[in-house]
Image (cartoon, helix red, strand yellow):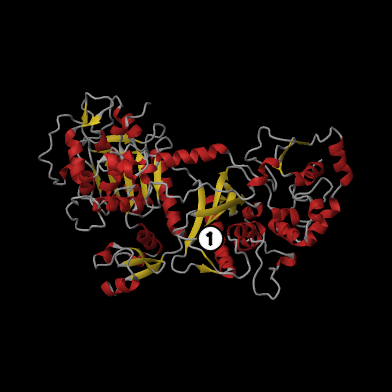
Amino acid sequence: MAPLPTEMRQIIALDLDNFYVGVERLRNPSLVGKPVGIKQKGILATCSYEARAKGVGKLMSLKQAKEKCPELIVVLGEDLTPYRHYSRLVFNLVRSIVGPSVPVEKLGMDELFIDCSSLVKVHLGETTFRRRADGQIWFSLSSGEPGLGFWYAEDRWAGHRLEDEGLEVEAGPQSTSPSSSNNRPNPYLVASHLALHLRTQIQDQIGLGTSGGVSHNKLLSKLIASTHKPADQTSLSPLFLPSTSPPSLHPSTSYLIQVYLDPLTLRKLAGFGHTITSKIIQTLSSLDPPPPPELDPDAPTVLTTRTHLSLSTFKSLFTPRLAPILYSLLHGDDPSPVVPSPEFPAQIGVEESYASNHFFEWRRFTSEVERLLTSLLVRLEEELVVVGDEKAGKRRWVRWPMKLRMEIRRGWDSPNGREGKSVDMPVGVFDLGVEVEKRVRMLMGRKVAGGEEENEVGGTTRKVGGVVGSLMRGLIKEGEGGKEFELYVINFAALSLSTHAPGPSIEQWTKSSSSSTPTSSKGKHRAPPDLDLSILNELPSDLRAEVLSSYGLSERDVAELLKDRRPLKLRKVFEEGQGSAVEKGGGEGQDLVDETVGGVMEERPELETMEADAEENTIGWRSDLEEDGEDADEEEWGADGEEEKETCSICRLRVFPFALAAHALFHVADG
């Protein structure tokens, strides 16, 4: 079925009412009906409608909030785990109702867009409607399951209509073109009932209230959803000129939209973030004569902006691609598609900012890194681990992030913006049989013989090694010498999610042969295939210790592994056929290898293209659209040696040259 022109789409916007408070009330029903505030970073991130009625506002200090509402109940909301959980429940429920072919886009944790145009088109294309005795029509949500759907009245809108809001549009041209035809229901009326059905299901099955908006684009659907908050919805039924191709809005609809938008401040429109709005304010203030004063000079309205700044002015302020997009948004024109959100995000990250306390020394830096890594691993398990067997309670990964990235920001005015480095994700991270805290210590290279943590001389500072230690020292040049440095942001992200497991946990390589460790046909230990023990023995002691810590190995483990080196067989593999076991260069199957053990994973280039396309498609839905330097070209940790990897002809895994011997030994051990 051919998609509708962007001007004639039916798009639903759903906004979860007072989301954080709603989640806390599900967790603690005694909060229902009482003034509640959610505390984050020492201020109120949000508050309930009961608290707002007493004068409490978002981002208000606790002292101010208590003065206005002494009975305010403050709930600590810095742990985002429950909010992410309920956000996923809502997203998955909506997707299950509308089906896999209908785009559902998630915006933050509490907003969704649904392009239901195809559903409505199929429904209105039915030869004969199924009707009840009272005349209501059945909307089927699944051709294969007749019971999935809802009844609606074709002569009544669900919720409110923007056309009935009393906006002063008398001066505009009158409409002569109806939206519906052939005695079929108005498609936007049908979409309003679908929005009501979705909102009802979210309330009944999850317990969260929502508001909704229905129109022909994302911008307007999102804006009008707030017209009758909470727990209600508003629709706009656009009229079109039938003689144009593609169809264009009738002047009366365009006029209605402009009347609705003009009083709004710019920051109400998606895309007009702080940086863009600041440029516009500066430009308006420099005009001669200046525009009439606003009620708030720091919050110009749509009317003031569009009547005093032309498209050519926008082009002088912003990039050639961005300027026409912003200017169109001022007039209610938003062709951006509803981009289906994946079941799993492209990356999962945690971040902390330190604007008010940005002076660090190495010990504090290490402590913050450990805390953030713990949060990251907890979140990875929240979003990527499921219970595979309900009875046994066994958990399993459904996606495996192949890369770990660390970013910092040294200052708000830093010309480089954020600095970041990436490494391959150590496979030990995926061992659900090991506590999160122990896996974090493995990432930081703190595990030594006996499982104790290693201390530097004097015991004053814990040494950081492993992959995270490399990241830290690569980004903070001051190092561990005790020199103080500034740091405003620390971010960790797990990315490059794969549908295939990277292989057995590194822990399994170091357990005794009496455990469930994979062994050779003769029951002996095997070394991690990308760890060359002969090269390891020649390394300086400090570098050797760092390499061992990155694998979670101790000297005792190495002593055990050295017992099974098999040098004669290994030499034979290479001498017969002059290196037939390992080939130089590329070959199919070398990028993002599906089944490896301790190997280096290559990112698929097409993934970067897909992410770039997604960003392009959703350009109107970022808080700031201009490129402000924060997304500068990223330097990958260890990228200089990528071209020197070689490819195994047996398993197609790409490994570094120094690891070839141990990797070939892995295949010999397998017989």
Q: How many marks?
A: 1
Find numbered disc 1 in the image and state the secondary structure of the residue it sits on. Answer: helix
Q: Residue at x 78, y 61 (%)?
A: 555
- Does 637 sit left or right of 267 as displayed? right
Judge whether residue 180 can be spotted in this image: yes
Residue 487 vertical position relative to residue 419 in the rendered view, above or below: below
Q: Quadrant of the C terminus?
A: top right
To which residue does mark 1 refer?
375
Location of the N terminus by quadrant is top left
Furthest-front residue in this view: 288
Name the residue located 36 percent from the left edge and 41 percent from the top edge.
Answer: 322
Q: At label 1, which amino acid type do we have? A: Ser
Image-based side of 460 in relation to 245, left or right? right
Q: Nearer the viewer, residue 26 or 186?
A: 186
Q: x, y percentage for residue 302? A: 23, 47
Residue 605 falls left or right of residue 552: left
The extreme right residue here reads: 568
- Give the percent coordinates (x, y) of residue 456: 69, 71
Residue extending furthest toward the left = 170
Q: Measured along the vertical axis of the image, is residue 489 above or below residue 530?
A: below
> What residue lies at 70% left-to-right and 37% top-to-bottom?
652
Judge the density around disc 1: few (<14), some (14-19), many (≥20) Cα neighbours within 10 Å.
some
Give the percent coordinates (x, y) of residue 93: 41, 46
In x, y percent, where is residue 18?
33, 58
Left or right: 579, with 590 as reference point: right
Q: Nearer the viewer, residue 223 or 640?
A: 640
| Residue 339 visible here | no
Compared with 71, 53 (above or below) is: above
